[in-house]
Image (tube, helix red, strand yellow):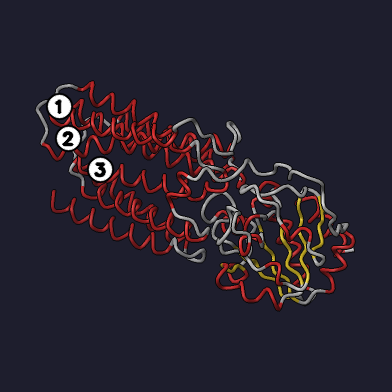
């Protein structure tokens, strides 16, 4: 049976790898999910048979409850809340790893080996940090606590101290395993570390935090795999951990900031706060005026942002794009790597509206085309189009690659107000003479644009 089990585990690992590879493109993402799910199904089924479980009652109950929660979440959670749900899923993954490792310690009758004890501590530490850090990320994204950085006196010194305490307690547990109180103390220190490590991170950096927490959940799972001597759990956890770290690096590069700056820089605001000082004049257009401009445009690049998700306006935006294409205009979508509040947020949003993949372009693919574009239509984006990133050295955005919206012949921005983005930086593009500001809820404004163009 062990030979069959190992072969199935190998097949599952191969499916995981191909699943991840397919997730790298929106075109193949569904296939990637299907391959990864098939791999996980095979791994679970062969594990249940290999362990010769006598009573499946609790397992079946868990499957029913977990499956019902998953189906409910998939059916009811809006795209606006997708980052929160991903943050929670990361946390649940970390919690599951920590609980399994602790349960294995309780189950063992004899003293386990040193390697098992070390990985047990790592699983509990990383898993607990992931769970409580993810809860804080969820609370920030959900608006339960404010999204701006919350920095306490000597915050980072305290975090460093908590990490040392957790590692020290883990070391004591490794050398004195019968003292289970040491492992519980690791849980307490890790809980505080998880909370305090995320609260000083602002809303603008949530895509990085979500990627990093995803990596943590994978590392916790891999450590638990060593505790259980389960090869497929080690492989799958290592894949998630490595891919999460790679994605974190991509997000940091997209903002031209180091991971240390994201974690310790306390950059950002709640988003949507008013700009201090007197309001400067802008060129304000009505939806009727905007419709006339779009009607005469031959090339249009649409830049979606988090405001599009908040308004749930992706379907009417695609309807507008379809009308413009039927009139002979070339319409494309430009996506910044950190647009929205989680990696790939805008891609998922547009996919839900059935926007064809060949209309969606990454920043590097389309940035040079803005200078030859009649209208750049911005819907709810802010920091990722802010020219201050190029020249304002004291700005937290300085050096971040941005979409070259300001180089288009005309710029049209649909936004509720002149409030800054999550970085808290006023956007000079709003006041550019060629920028047309259309104030209002994105869905309402776009619906009016569609009505005007149809009329």
CA–CA distance between discs 3 and 2? 10 Å
* Camera-side mark, 3 or 1: 1
Q: Is residue 64 visible?
A: no
Residues marked 3 and 1 touching at CB (< 8 Å): no
Residues marked 3 and 2 touching at CB (< 8 Å): no
450 or 333: nearer the viewer: 333
**In percent of the image, x 51 and y 34: which residue is there?**
151
Res. 177 mark: 1
The answer to which quarter of the image holds residue 337 is: bottom right
- Whole-percent x and y of residue 275? 73, 45
284 or 275: nearer the viewer: 275
Res. 117 mark: 2
Q: Where 64 sits versus 40, above or below?
A: above
- Whole-percent x and y of residue 301? 69, 69
Q: Are there few (<14), some (14-19), or many (20+) residues within 10 Å of tag 2?
A: many
Q: Are there few (<14), some (14-19), or many (20+) residues within 10 Å of tag 1?
A: some
**In percent of the image, x 67 and y 55: which residue is there?**
382
Which residue does the numbered mark 3 point to in the structure image? 223
Classify mark 1: helix, strand or loop: loop
- Whole-percent x and y of residue 49? 22, 42
Q: Earlier in the sequence, mark 3 or mark 2?
A: 2
Split into 4 quadrants, where in the image is the C terminus? bottom right
């Amino acid at each position: 049976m062990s030979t069959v089990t190992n072969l199935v585990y190998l097949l599952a690992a191969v499916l995981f790898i191909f699943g991840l590879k397919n997730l790298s493109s929106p075109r193949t993402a569904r296939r990637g999910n299907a391959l990864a799910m098939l791999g996980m199904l095979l791994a679970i089924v062969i594990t249940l048979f290999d362990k010769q479980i006598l009573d499946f009652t609790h397992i079946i109950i868990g499957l029913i409850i977990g499956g019902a929660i998953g189906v409910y979440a998939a059916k009811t959670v809006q795209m606006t809340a997708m980052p929160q749900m991903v943050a929670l899923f990361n946390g649940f993954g970390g919690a599951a790893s920590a609980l399994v490792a602790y349960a294995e310690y309780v189950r063992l009758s004899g003293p386990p080996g040193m390697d098992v004890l070390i990985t047990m501590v790592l699983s509990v530490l990383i898993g607990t940090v992931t769970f409580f850090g993810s809860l804080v990320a969820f609370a920030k994204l959900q608006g339960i606590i404010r999204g701006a950085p919350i920095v306490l006196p000597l915050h980072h010194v305290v975090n460093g101290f908590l990490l040392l305490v957790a590692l020290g307690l883990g070391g004591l547990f490794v050398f004195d395993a019968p003292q289970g109180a040491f492992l519980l103390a690791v849980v307490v220190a890790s809980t505080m570390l998880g909370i305090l490590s995320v609260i000083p991170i602002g809303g603008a950096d949530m895509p990085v935090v979500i990627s990093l927490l995803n990596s943590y959940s994978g590392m916790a799972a891999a450590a638990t795999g060593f505790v259980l001597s389960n090869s497929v759990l080690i492989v799958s956890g290592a894949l998630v951990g490595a891919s999460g770290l790679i994605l974190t690096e991509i997000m940091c590069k997209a903002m031209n900031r180091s991971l240390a700056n994201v974690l310790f820089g306390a950059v950002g605001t709640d988003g949507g706060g008013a700009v201090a000082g007197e309001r400067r004049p802008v060129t304000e257009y009505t939806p009727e005026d905007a419709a006339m401009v779009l009607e005469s445009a031959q090339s249009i690049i649409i830049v979606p942002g988090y405001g599009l998700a908040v308004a749930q306006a992706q379907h009417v935006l695609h309807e507008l794009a379809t009308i413009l294409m039927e009139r002979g205009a070339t319409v494309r979508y430009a996506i910044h790597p950190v647009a929205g509040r989680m990696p790939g947020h805008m891609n998922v949003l547009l996919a839900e509206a059935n926007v064809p993949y060949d209309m969606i372009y990454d920043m590097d693919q389309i940035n040079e085309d803005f200078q030859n574009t009649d209208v750049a239509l911005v819907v709810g984006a802010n920091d990722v189009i802010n020219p201050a990133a190029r020249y304002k050295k004291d700005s937290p955005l300085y050096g971040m690659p941005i979409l070259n919206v300001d180089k288009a012949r005309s710029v049209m921005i649909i936004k509720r107000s002149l409030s800054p983005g999550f970085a808290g930086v006023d956007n000079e593009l709003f006041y550019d003479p060629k920028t047309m500001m259309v104030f209002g809820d994105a869905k309402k404004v776009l619906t009016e644009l569609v009505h005007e163009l149809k009329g």
